[in-house]
Amino acid sequence: FSTNAGRLSATSVNTDDSGVARTSLNTTREATVTANVAGKTAEITIGLNPRTGISITGPTNSISAGLPASFTVSVGGEANVRDVTVDFGDGRVQSLGALSGSTTVQHTYVAPGTYTVTATATEATGFTEQVATSVTILPAQPPGVVITPSTTSPTVNQIITITATVSGATSTILEYQWDFGDGTTATTTGPQITKSYGSVGTKVIRVTVVQAIGPSGQGQTTVDVRQ
């Protein structure tokens, strides 16, 4: 017998009464064992099952920056795992503690790119195993912004309430920058503002939503001011 990895208990073995010859392989990685009998050879490849049963799966599709990516981490039911850590590949590491079975963990990337995500399981004995997957993060898309006035046909000097609704990939919103279409502007930290117009006509209302991380979102609508 011969192997390309690890150590065999015996390389030359006599057959027993049943014509079977046995040897044992001790290896820490996948190995190919070759048996040679009277000039004829046969090979078998022996794989390794993770001792802790650790596995990790990530999103099957690309994720935009600013949106959470979900990863499923599992360990074997019989494993005595004292801690599992997940390195998300962007400098951030999360401990999942003494995991048993499966759990889902989410992580939000702020920059586009391809990241290698590594899960490490540590047994009570100190033995560790690692598995990895990859995730592709696309550039962040601007959030969608819809502006809704309390009425689209106010009269002159009537106070209306204007609301901005933001959707999509958003981080902390720092401010809302309003342009009311009559030469006046305002900035708020909340999504609502009140406004009255002093002249008739169609006014275009625009708002820019500024985020702490990621591109700004913009929206617009119109109101028809009547006498």
Image (spheres, grey):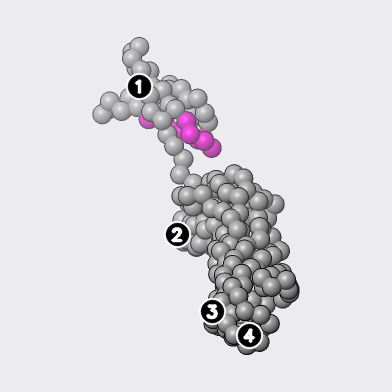
Mark 4 = which residue? 156
Observer-side mark, 4 or 3, equals 4
Q: Nearer the viewer, mark 1 or mark 3?
A: 3
Residue at 62% across, 45% down: 113
Task: Give yes or no for contact between labels 4 and 3 (Cβ–Cβ under 8 Å).
Answer: no
Q: Distance between the Cα atoms at labels 1 and 2?
A: 36 Å
Question: Identity of the amino acid at label 1?
Answer: Ala
Q: Which mark, by number, is residue 77?
A: 2
The residue that appears at 46% across and 40% down in the rendered structure is 48
Name the element at disc 2.
loop
Name the residue carrying label 3: 152
Relative to 49, say whether 5 is above or below.
above
Of the 4 image quadrants, the one containing the C terminus is: bottom right
The residue at the far top in this view is 39
Q: What residue is drawn where x is 38% and y is 24%?
A: 43
Disc 4 on helix, strand or loop?
Answer: loop
Image coordinates of residue 206 in percent, x first then y, are 64, 68
Q: Main secondary structure of the magenta part?
A: loop
User: Which quadrant of the view contains residue 13?
Assistant: top left
Residue 40: give x, y in percent of width and height: 33, 14
